[in-house]
């Protein structure tokens, strides 16, 4: 039995912990995380038997990725003022989408894979849910807790925990590896998460029966990918070829208007390099109300989008996207082409050929990378080489003709239909088909003998033909 010397727990609470199913209300976060390398972030759930460890203002963090420095500001009050017994439930894989897909959505508790965890958060005097924590911060969490508590982590299971003698005044760091993670590939995700939740419930019941004050944390070593076996996540977040791409829910694309929207431009990442200087123009371009579009122009056959930035690399720099719209009798339709990209600075102009940015005029153009770097299939080719300027547009999309509202039309993607892998598969299949056809032809060409030797009659005489 545990020998525990603990202060009486205060039943009053100043804040109510949010149920895990309430993370269902974070679709915006899911889009942001997916768009910014979600595979590098994991959720972190904290709760404690003491109250007032975290301010209500930091209860939710929609769209925010918690760094290691920020995480320490959340953990320090709990470690300095809260209980000295710290439980770290460490799962192999976990993502915020797991709570969305398998939690008790809209109070449907019986279908939740996190019933014990939700109950613990409901009853905890103080709690904190961080939907997206930087992977590096989580990877150093055990070391950080060890340094703050001055106690080495003790790997325990449920049987070992029942035999421990914890003291409320002495620090203890208990590391509990949740089971089923190694063989999760053989089990459905819901069964894995339900089994882990059962362990959490049993551990918390043990501590509660002994009246042990504690602070608990649940996180994972790596993010997981939610299996698409539930309707609410079946749609996915990926971009589909020729998909009617809606305007981003997070940031609007750049839109040039005269009497109506004429040119739309979007990029997830807009980076330029001059010499050995690097600058990310994304926050200066998208979602900016006073973006300087002076010099932009549009008509039915010609469009120019001009983006001007003050004090960029110590001077004023203007980027001009030049697009033309032509009718081609062979295809009997109009096609647009981005003829060039111009960079104006200090009275000089640098030209990049961008003729591969093309498509039917009724579509927008999309490409994962439009860059002057060879590693990104340089669709931007400088006319003068070497060039001091380099540019990379990630998740690039543009439309200058047939724009209807502030929403892109279907996207003509730069990705070729036949990738190298497809060509290799086709050639290998054709070669194997040729071998099969030749072998079948040889088998069908075999002829059996139609005359046989009879020992009762004269012997068969075969005349040699020369």
Image: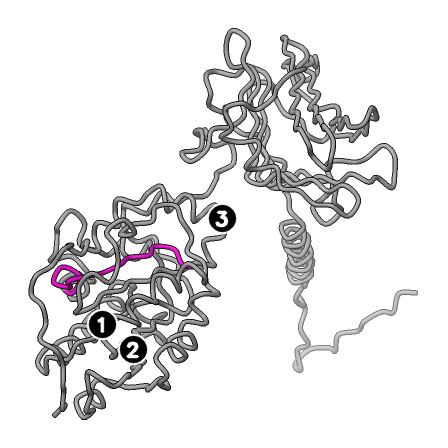
Spatial CA span between label 3 and label 1:
31 Å
Quadrant of residue 332 in the image? top right
Foreground tag (2 vs 3): 3
**Badge 1: few (under 14), some or many (20 or more) residues near its Cα, within 10 Å?**
some
Closer to the chain start, of discs 2 and 3, is: 3
Q: Secondary structure at mark 1?
A: helix
Closer to the chain start, of discs 3 and 1, is: 3
Coordinates of residue 193 in the picture (x, y in percent): 26, 66
> In this figure, which residue is indicated by the disc labeled 2?
179
Q: Is residue 126 magenta?
A: yes
> In this figure, which residue is indicated by the disc labeled 1?
195
In the picture, which quadrant includes the C terminus? Answer: bottom right
Check the image and report above or below for 21 versus 338. Answer: below
Give the magenta-colored segment's residue range: 120-133
Q: Is residue 5 magenta?
A: no
Q: Secondary structure at mark 2?
A: loop
Quadrant of residue 267 in the image? top right
Quadrant of residue 402 in the image? top right
> In this figure, which residue is indicated by the disc labeled 3?
36
Foreground tag (3 vs 1): 3
């Amino acid at each position: 039995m545990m020998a525990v010397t603990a202060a009486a727990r205060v039943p009053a609470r100043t804040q109510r912990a949010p149920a895990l199913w309430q993370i269902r209300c974070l679709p915006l976060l899911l889009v942001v995380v997916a768009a910014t390398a979600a595979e590098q972030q994991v959720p972190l759930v904290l709760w404690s038997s003491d109250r007032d460890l975290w301010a209500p203002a930091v209860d939710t963090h929609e769209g925010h990725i918690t760094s290691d420095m920020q995480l320490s500001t959340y953990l320090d009050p709990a470690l300095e003022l809260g209980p000295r017994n710290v439980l770290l439930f460490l799962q192999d894989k976990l993502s915020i989408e797991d709570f969305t897909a398998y939690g008790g959505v809209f109070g449907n508790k019986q279908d939740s894979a996190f019933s014990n965890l939700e109950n613990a958060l409901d009853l905890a005097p103080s709690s904190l849910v961080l939907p997206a924590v930087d992977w590096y911060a989580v990877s150093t969490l055990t070391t950080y807790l060890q340094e703050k508590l001055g106690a080495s982590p003790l790997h325990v299971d449920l049987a070992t925990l029942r035999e421990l003698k914890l003291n409320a005044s002495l620090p203890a760091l208990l590391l509990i590896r949740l089971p089923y993670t190694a063989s999760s590939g053989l089990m459905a995700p819901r069964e894995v998460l339900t089994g882990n939740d059962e362990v959490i419930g049993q551990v918390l019941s043990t501590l509660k029966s002994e009246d042990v004050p504690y602070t608990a944390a649940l996180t994972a070593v790596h993010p997981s990918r939610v299996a698409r076996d539930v309707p609410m996540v079946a749609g996915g977040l990926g971009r589909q070829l020729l998909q009617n791409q809606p305007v981003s829910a997070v940031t609007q694309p750049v839109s040039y208007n005269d009497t109506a929207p004429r040119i739309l431009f979007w990029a997830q990442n807009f980076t330029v390099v001059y010499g050995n200087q690097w600058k990310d123009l994304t926050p200066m371009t998208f979602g900016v109300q006073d973006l300087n579009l002076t010099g932009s122009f549009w008509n039915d056959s010609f469009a120019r989008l001009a983006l001007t930035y003050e004090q960029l690399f110590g001077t004023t720099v203007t980027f001009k996207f030049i697009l033309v719209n032509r009718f081609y009798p062979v295809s009997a339709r109009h096609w647009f082409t981005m003829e060039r990209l111009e960079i104006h600075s200090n009275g000089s102009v640098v030209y990049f050929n961008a003729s591969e940015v093309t498509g039917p005029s009724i579509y927008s153009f999309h490409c994962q990378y439009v860059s002057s770097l060879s590693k990104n299939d340089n669709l931007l080719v400088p006319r003068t080489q070497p060039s001091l300027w380099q540019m990379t547009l990630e998740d690039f999309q543009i439309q200058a003709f047939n724009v209807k509202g502030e929403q892109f039309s279907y996207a003509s993607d730069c990705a070729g239909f036949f990738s190298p892998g497809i060509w290799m598969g086709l050639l290998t299949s054709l070669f194997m088909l040729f071998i099969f056809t030749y072998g079948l032809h040889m088998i069908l060409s075999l002829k059996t003998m139609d005359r046989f030797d009879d020992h009762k009659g004269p012997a068969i005489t075969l005349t040699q033909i020369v």
